[in-house]
Image (cartoon, rainbow, N blue to C red):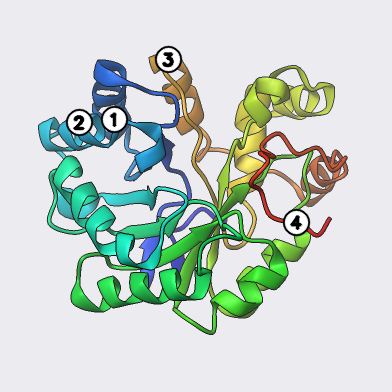
Amino acid sequence: MNVEDRQAQGLALPALGFGTMRLQGDEARDGVMHALSLGYRLIDTAHKYGNEAEVGQGIEASPVSRDDIVLVTKLPQPSQTDEVRPAAVEALRRLRTDHLDLLLIHWPDAQTPRDEVLGELDVLRAEGLTRAVGVCNYPPTMMDAAVGIAPVAVNQVEYHPYLSQADVLERAARYDHVIMAYAPLARGRVVDDPVLTEIGADHGKAASQVALRWLIQQDRVLAIPASATPARREQNAAILDFELSEDEMARIHALDEGTRIVDPPHAPDWER
């Protein structure tokens, strides 16, 4: 069924994680606690989300052992080289932990010395402040350069049925890292998709569950859906009890139209 943990650079990553973007205050704390109670074991946050403290509170209040949780956060953007260590130490304080499992660069930035920043992240990895390091939103040629600087475990990118990431996935296989799919439900668009709905009806599943299943059924892909709604979190978690056929997978791949939802002014050249 291809839903076992993803392995990259010696780190095991669950195929399904819980994203916390847009969750604030008690909503973030309680959402993390609820997600952990449902069996999610990867929690993704970022300095930019403004909720690291509440995410840390939720983990601390949960009966799930910290050792069983893969905790991911992302450095603020931009980050000059001498800002990397203080930012990481401050993230540890907010998250109430003595180490991260995965520390990412949130966005590549033309004004920031990317090589030096990634190299500094690798120093933190060697010192044990994080178990692994990675990047976000790196197009293929930028990844070609990054892997020569540090053992990159993850490239977190937008990925859903309407946006192929074939070239990014090819680099993941070549360089032994994992693609962490954000916006995996295309900000809700998949819910009414007729193809996903039809496939879902054959499995007794919602269209959104089919989209998530399609992602995690691919090699080197994991998904981090975010939801402020307990019922949605439960629905998103219930995707391990069915399997898509090769034909169904191909039909979903065919939905690609190059639609990118997240494309801010500081985004890199996506090369596609």
Taking the view exactly as shown, the residue that stands out farthest to the bottom is: 148
> CB of mark 4 within 8 Å of CB of mark 2?
no
SS category of the residue bearing label 1: helix
Discs 1, 2 touching: Cβ within 8 Å: yes
| Foreground disc of the pair 3, 4 | 4
Residue 34 versus residue 131 in the image, above or below: above
Residue 97, percent across and down? 14, 50
Between the C-alphas of marks 3 and 4, the distance is 34 Å
Look at mark 4 in the image and give the residue it sits on.
269
Amino acid type, label 1: Val
Confirm whether residue 28 shows in the render: yes
Local crowd size for mark 4, using a 10 Å CA cut-off: few (<14), some (14–19), many (≥20) = few
Chain-order first, disc 3 or disc 2: 2
Image: 161 above or below 72: above
Q: Which residue is under mark 1? A: 32
At mark 4, the secondary structure is loop
Calculate the distance from the C-alpha at mark 1 to the C-alpha at mark 3.
Answer: 12 Å
Query: Compared to 111, does 132 lie above or below?
Result: below
- State which tag comes first along the sequence, 4 or 2: 2
Query: Residue 99: x, y in percent?
Result: 18, 59
Earlier-in-chain disc, 1 versus 3: 1
- Element assignment for label 3: loop
| Residue drawn at point x = 35 percent, y = 49 percent | 73
Disc sitting over residue 58 in the figure: 2
Q: Earlier in the sequence, mark 1 or mark 4?
A: 1
Is residue 45 among what the camera can see? Answer: no
| Above or below, comparing residue 68 to residue 171 in the picture | above
Tell me the tag on residue 229: 3
